[in-house]
Image (cartoon, rainbow, N blue to C red):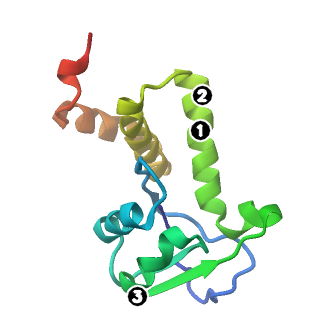
Amino acid sequence: MAESIPQDGESKKHSKPRSINHIKMIVIEDLLADTITPIVEQNVCLSSTVDSDASTSYAELKNIVKEHRPKVIPKKEVGKMLPWVHIAISNAKRLLLNTYHDIKPEYLQSYLNEFCYKFNRRYFGQNLFDRLLIATVSYKNQFRYKIR
């Protein structure tokens, strides 16, 4: 999920990609509507406008949010229609493959949380380390007893 807020005077049909504010990545088991709909209900504000591809997995979103704008995306234009979603996914894949090489499925959500944390705070500059340090010492991990 990628949150973007339209800039002042921006029309619905803008020529350049909107800036992105925050992203959130959630590991899901399948792409069924029964799986996706509750996740959207929990993570997206009811007054939001959702842009997505025209997958049948998103059929129920029109009942959850103020406006759902599904679009059929030709294969050649995948990166142009939802650019920040694709940029975030490709950056996360590259980070995980280059840094960690092999990730166990039970830890994937933690790695994605770390990526989103860094991405959402990319403009913090020198304050990022201090904020990360505070978050680290105040967080109680859930995998403490799984370490072998």
Give the residue drawn at x 33%, y 76%.
45
Question: Is residue 125 shown above or below 143?
Answer: below
Whether residues under marks 2 and 3 lie with C-beta atoms below 8 angstroms apart, the answer is no
Disc 3 element: loop
Give the residue drawn at x 38%, y 40%.
109
The circle drawn on residue 15 is none
Whole-angstrom CA distance, mark 1 to mark 3, is 32 Å
Whole-angstrom CA distance, mark 2 to mark 3, is 37 Å
Residue 138 % position (x, y): 17, 36
Disc 2 element: helix
Question: Is residue 104 shown above or below 77?
Answer: above
Residue 28 % position (x, y): 41, 50
Whole-angstrom CA distance, mark 1 to mark 2, is 6 Å
The circle drawn on residue 97 is 2
> Visible in this render: residue 91?
yes
Classify the position of the C terminus by image quarter.
top left
The circle drawn on residue 66 is 3
Question: Is residue 10 shown above or below 130?
Answer: below
Q: Amino acid at mark 1?
A: Lys
Crowdedness near tag 3: few (<14), some (14–19) or many (≥20) residues, C-alpha within 10 Å: few
Q: Quadrant of residue 79?
A: bottom right
Residue 132 % position (x, y): 33, 37
Whether residues under marks 1 and 2 lie with C-beta atoms below 8 angstroms apart, the answer is yes
Q: Amino acid at mark 3?
A: Lys
Q: Quadrant of residue 70?
A: bottom right
Instruction: First in sequence, mark 1 or 3: give its number.
Output: 3
Question: Is residue 108 shown above or below 76?
Answer: above
Q: Amino acid at mark 2?
A: Leu
- The residue that mark 1 highlights is 93
